[in-house]
Amino acid sequence: RAATGGAAANAWPSGDEDLRRLLAAFDGLVVDWDLTSVGGRSDQQVILLSPGFEYNMEAFVQVRPVYMRDIWGRTWILRWDRQVVSTSTSKYAINDPRRANQAVVRYHVRLDPLTQSLLLEPEYTVRIFASDVGAAMGYVALAAMALNLWRRIRKSASGVTAVPMGTVTPTARAPGQGEYGLKEE
């Protein structure tokens, strides 16, 4: 948790049961070694060990947590992405005569310290929606102020109350129109 600076601390398990569930979702990583250089078979991942030799197998691995964030801003670990970046095998003779009848196999797995976590999040969240609604309300308020200003200017110019669409009343008629806007015959 400290490594993330607290940004993803809530996404990590808080109890033993959550930790077990998270580790259960972490599938094993298969490392395919090139064993031909040490006398083995790479297709079956088998080495015929010879006494008096040390076999070193090194792997450089990237493990990255993938976080998911929903539209409400909650974050959790979705999965673990992992890959083997490189492998190497080597075989050395043991110089110690007391260990001449032993075959030593050493595995050295290094994790890439520069691997960054990945955050998947929707493009449109509730927070963005609220911001957009606030912006729309601002535009409506600006339009209402402009309309009010226009009405005041028209009123002061003519001395009569002006309405943007004209006076609308049940008795207001255009020339040649009867009641409710019907044509007179």
Image (cartoon, rainbow, N blue to C red):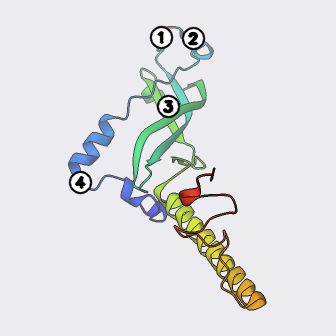
Calculate the distance from the C-alpha at mark 2 to the C-alpha at mark 1.
7 Å
Residue pointed to by mark 1 = 48
- Please tell me the numbered disc located at residue 175: none
Q: Secondary structure at mark 4?
A: loop
Percent across and percent down for residue 34 are 59, 18
> Residue, x 52% and y 67% (percent of image)?
170
Say few, some or many: other residues with alpha carbon within 10 Å of mark 4 (under 14 / 14 to 19 / 20 or more). few
Q: Amino acid at mark 2?
A: Gly
Q: Which is closer to the viewer, label 1 or label 3?
A: 1
- Please tell me the numbered disc located at residue 39: 2
Q: Amino acid at mark 4?
A: Gly
> Residue, x 41% and y 55% (percent of image)?
72
Residue pointed to by mark 3 = 96
Calculate the distance from the C-alpha at mark 1 to the C-alpha at mark 3.
21 Å
Q: Secondary structure at mark 1?
A: loop
Say few, some or many: other residues with alpha carbon within 10 Å of mark 2 (under 14 / 14 to 19 / 20 or more). some
N-term-proximal mark, 2 vs 1: 2
> Residue, x 40% and y 60% (percent of image)?
9
Q: Total label count?
A: 4
Calculate the distance from the C-alpha at mark 2 to the C-alpha at mark 3.
22 Å
> Residue, x 53% and y 48% (percent of image)?
117
- Asked if one can make out residue 94 in the rendered structure from this viewpoint, the answer is no
